[in-house]
Structure formats: structure tokens, C-alpha cells
Image (cartoon, grey):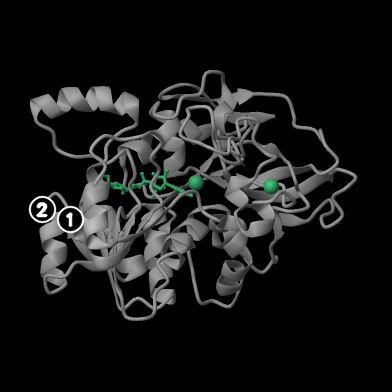
Amino acid sequence: MKALRIHKPKDVRVDNVDDPSIEDPRDAIIRVTSTAICGSDLHIYNGLVPQPRPMSLGHEFMGIVEDVGAEVTNLKKGDRVVVPFPISCGRCYFCTHHLPTACENSNPNYGVRSGLLKEKGGALFGYTDLYGGYEGGQAEAVRVPYADYGPRKVPDSLTDEQVLFLTDILPTGWTAIDKAGLKGGETVAVFGAGPVGLMAMKSAWIQGAGRVIALDRQGYRLDMARTAANAETIDVDDEDPVDRIFELTGGYGADVVVDAVGMEAEHDLGVLERVHDIVAKHQGGSLEVFHQAVTACKRGGFLSVVGVYTTEYDNFPLGQMFDKGIGYWGGQALVHNYIDQLLQLIETGKLRTDDIITHTLPLDQAPHGYDIFNKKEDNCAKVILKP
Ligand SMILES: NC(=O)c1ccc[n+]([C@@H]2O[C@H](COP(=O)([O-])OP(=O)(O)OC[C@H]3O[C@@H](n4cnc5c(N)ncnc54)[C@H](O)[C@@H]3O)[C@@H](O)[C@H]2O)c1
Ligand SMILES: [Zn+2]
Ligand SMILES: [Zn+2]
């Protein structure tokens, strides 16, 4: 079968690989009908998350069940399912305590301490050997472990485009807002109007925000934040984002700030900074947006970080966060906890997410999809691949 594989940074190819097969009684094989490219894939593509051997990428996928292992009784051949991107066993301490991303069983590199390079949380589909080495879903078919726990059946009345984002970006945006515990009427500022930021904005309205402010440096993505997520917008290239948030909030700052940019923040650099940045890139990118997010947050406010950061960072603004009494949550999205509730919101028409799709391509054109999504060319916001 065909699969999109990373060979080295900026080198992804559609290769012929072996078909997946049942390796464990809890496995299922899914024939992929739709899969998306994520900002998280770009960290591997750009070399910030290294992958030493060719591996198929993709953790946002859905499709038709082709085969199930002996212990998978909830699914049968022909079922149409969406699959959460974290691989979780459903039975360990963390899976049974609403922390599926901390699954103790799915990742050979699992570590209780973390902080050490080779100690990670639960595994993720198509996300390098460090996160379990599972082949990804940007492929014609994929092996899904613990298939009696993760995949959710979706009704035929909904298109792939309507439900695909239940696999990742919608629960990710939703988690960021839910962790902030809105009481109603809050001002929510979202750094990054990419797919994840847009889902956070949509989630903020449904969870009771009074105001949603989007920040980005791509005009066409800010347009989308206005049209698809009804947000006020700040172009960070035109004005100082922090000053502008204080202006818009009567000098207080935003009640809730979401960092949906992460370590690959783009910013203007002086010569010295440029040298530092080249070194820093190899050490895990930039804290630029994180600093702005902390500064723009109201005293006593809440900061949710869903943009990815992979290493330790010097100059982390802990004193500033302490002085302001800012609440914090960051991490991989708790997809399993929210997916059923979110499917209901889509089914009842209270939430739509397919309005951010700008490109639908055959799997063969996936390398082009990566290129334009990474360079933000052709007004690309979200690419769907059809294997
Ligand atoms: N925590 C999770 O579970 C989870 C899940 C999915 C994605 N993510 C992460 O969320 C982040 C966003 O993902 P995405 O798919 O939306 O990716 P994306 O790359 O399309 O979006 C990032 C956006 O940030 C903007 N940006 C860059 N520099 C900026 C700056 N200095 N100020 C303001 N905006 C800036 C970009 O223009 C872009 O629109 C990535 O880091 C991704 O890995 C996390
Ligand atoms: Zn993703
Ligand atoms: Zn588990």
C-alpha cells in the first residue's frame, strides 16, 4: 500500500510499504478514507522533532474497519470510525483516571519522571520512535492498537469533513478552553489562528466567552478567524500584540490566553538573535509567543498552552507567572475525554469545523500539501488527504 513517509527534514515521500496486519488481539486495521496534515507534523518535517528512520506520518485519520483482533468486540468490518491521536490502553492507572495521554502501556519510551530526553508520555500515531514508533495514518491503511478503547463510530449522515477533526484539533482547542474553566463573559485571546487556534476560538464561544481575540501574522488566517470563528483580530506584524491586548481590555489583559503557536513561532530577528535562533532551533525553538502570552494575561488569569514545546528553556518567565498568579495548563489534548460530547455538538449542528479546510488532495500529492502548509502559501490553512 501507499504511505506518506518522512525520510529526513523537508523530505517526505509517498512510498510503497507493507500492508498493516493484526499484531495483537486488541488491534484493528482501518482503511483510511480521510486524513489531515497537522501543525504537529511540521515539527517533524522541519526537524525539531527528529525521526532517524523512514516512518509514515499522520495522526488525524478516519476510515472503515477492515479487520479486528479477537478481543475487539465493539467494532466490526465495515464500521466507519474516527480515531483519537493519542494511543491509550484504556486500562492503566492514568487511562482510568481521565489522563489517556499519560498511558503507561502504549509507549516503550514511557517514563514517570519525564524531563529526560527518552522519557515521554503515552504513544501517538505516526509521531516518531520517541512517541512509540507506530506507523501513521497518512496512508491507505493503518494498524490501530487498543481498538476496543479509542475509535468512535460516526453516523453516515455526517461527512468525513464534518467529523475528521474529532481526532485531534477540535478536542485540542476544546481542552485548552475547558481547562481554563470559564464562568461566562471572559475575554479569551488566542495566539495562532492556525487550525488549532481556530478550534480554540470556536470552543471558547460555546463554553461562554464574552469576547474572542485572535493573533497571527498571516492575514488570510486572521480573515478566517473573523469569518469562521467570529473573532476580533490582531496582526502581530502591524502592532505590538501585548500592547494591543491591553488596549482592548481596558488595561487589564485577557482573562484567558491560549498559546496555539508553540516553539516554531516566527519572529523578526536581529543579527545576534539570528545566530542564537539557529542554535536555539536545534534546542527546541523559541519561547517568543509564550512570553507574550504570559505578559498579555490578566493578573489572576489563566494560560493554556497547546502549541508544542519539546525541551527545557532558559529564561522561562516563572517569576512573572507567580507574581501575576496565573493559572496554567499545557499538554497533549485529552481527546478521549471530550470526543463523544464534541461529536454530539457536531451532530446537533451546534458546532461546525469543516469551514477551515482549504485544500483536499489525493495522498500522492501529500508532499505538495506539506510544502504549502509549512510555507503558508496558496492561503493554505488545513489540508485533507484522500488516500
Ligand atoms: N497539544 C496538542 O494536543 C496539540 C494538538 C495539535 C496541534 N498542536 C500544536 O498546536 C500548534 C498549532 O498547530 P496548527 O495545526 O494550528 O499549526 P499551524 O502551524 O498551522 O499554526 C500556527 C499558527 O501560528 C502562527 N504564528 C507563527 N508565529 C507567530 C507569532 N509570532 N505570533 C502569532 N502567531 C504566530 C502561524 O502563522 C500559524 O497560523 C502546533 O505547535 C502544534 O504542534 C498541539
Ligand atoms: Zn494533530
Ligand atoms: Zn493506559
310 relative to 247 in the view: left or right: right
At 38% from the left and 40% from the top, the residue drawn is: 309
Nearest the eye: 158 or 69: 69
Q: What amino acid does circle 1 point to? A: Asp
Q: What amino acid does circle 2 point to? A: Asp
Q: Residue 181: where, in percent of width, then height?
A: 42, 71
Q: Residue 355: where, in percent of width, then height?
A: 43, 62
At 32% from the left and 80% from the top, the residue drawn is: 185
Nearest the eye: 108 or 81: 108
Q: Is residue 36 above or below residue 203?
A: above
Picture mark count: 2
Compute the Cα span from label 1 to label 2.
5 Å
Q: Is residue 184 above or below residue 274?
A: below
At 49% from the left and 72% from the top, the residue drawn is: 351
Q: Which residue is mark 1?
A: 235
Name the residue at the right extreme: 70
